[in-house]
Image (cartoon, rainbow, N blue to C red):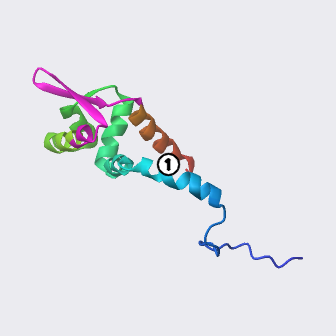
């Protein structure tokens, strides 16, 4: 029987293993600039709940969002404005009411995929 240690270290003992891959991929890292703001916006549980609610309904009034998430209209409005400013949601005024929806299907997919991933381990 072999005495192989299957535990691996979290670091490499060499500086670069495949220089061609590093050279090809490293310049592409600038493409993620600004993307972290999307995840920062969705990392807040209130905003994530709002986005999730907006995946379940095409649009919701601010007062309905507040009731769904168990918050005041002011709190819901604050988070909805933040999502709109981050280009994740859009709003439309209809008389005295303001309705919000997700900006596009990409946002819907991000939230939906995250929800599926989170449920996989259950």
Seen in the picture, residue 75 relative to 17 is either above or below; the reply is above
- Whether residue 29 sits left or right of residue 1 in the image: it is left
Which residue shows up at 14% across the image and 26% down it? 97
Which residue shows up at 44% across the image and 40% down it? 110
Q: Is mark 1 on a helix, strand or loop?
A: helix
**Residue that protrudes farthest toward the right in the picture:** 1
Magenta region includes residue 97: yes
Which residue shows up at 18% across the image and 43% down it? 78
Q: How crowded is the residue under tag 1: few (<14 C-alpha within 10 Å), some, or many (20+)?
A: few
Quarter location, residue 72: top left
Residue range of the region highlighted in magenta in the rendering: 82-105
**Residue that protrudes farthest toward the bottom in the picture:** 3
Q: In the depicted view, which residue is nearer to us: 67 or 74? A: 74
Which residue shows up at 38% across the image and 30% down it? 56
Seen in the picture, residue 99 relative to 19 is either above or below; the reply is above
Magenta region includes residue 98: yes
**Residue that protrudes farthest toward the top in the picture:** 95
* Residue 50 image position (x, y, % from top left): 30, 40
Instruction: Give the labeled residue for mark 1.
Output: 118
């Amino acid at each position: 029987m072999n005495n192989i240690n299957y535990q691996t270290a979290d670091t490499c003992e060499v500086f670069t293993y495949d220089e061609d891959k590093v050279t090809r991929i490293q310049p592409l890292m600038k493409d993620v600039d600004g993307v972290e703001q999307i995840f920062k916006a969705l990392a807040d549980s209130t905003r994530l709940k709002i986005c999730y609610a907006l995946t379940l309904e095409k649009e919701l009034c601010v007062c309905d969002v507040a009731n769904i998430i168990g918050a005041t209209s002011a709190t819901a409005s604050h988070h909805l404005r933040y999502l709109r400013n981050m280009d994740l949601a859009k709003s439309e005024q209809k008389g005295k009411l303001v309705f919000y929806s997700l900006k596009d299907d990409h946002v819907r997919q991000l939230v939906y995929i995250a929800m599926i991933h989170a449920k996989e381990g259950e």
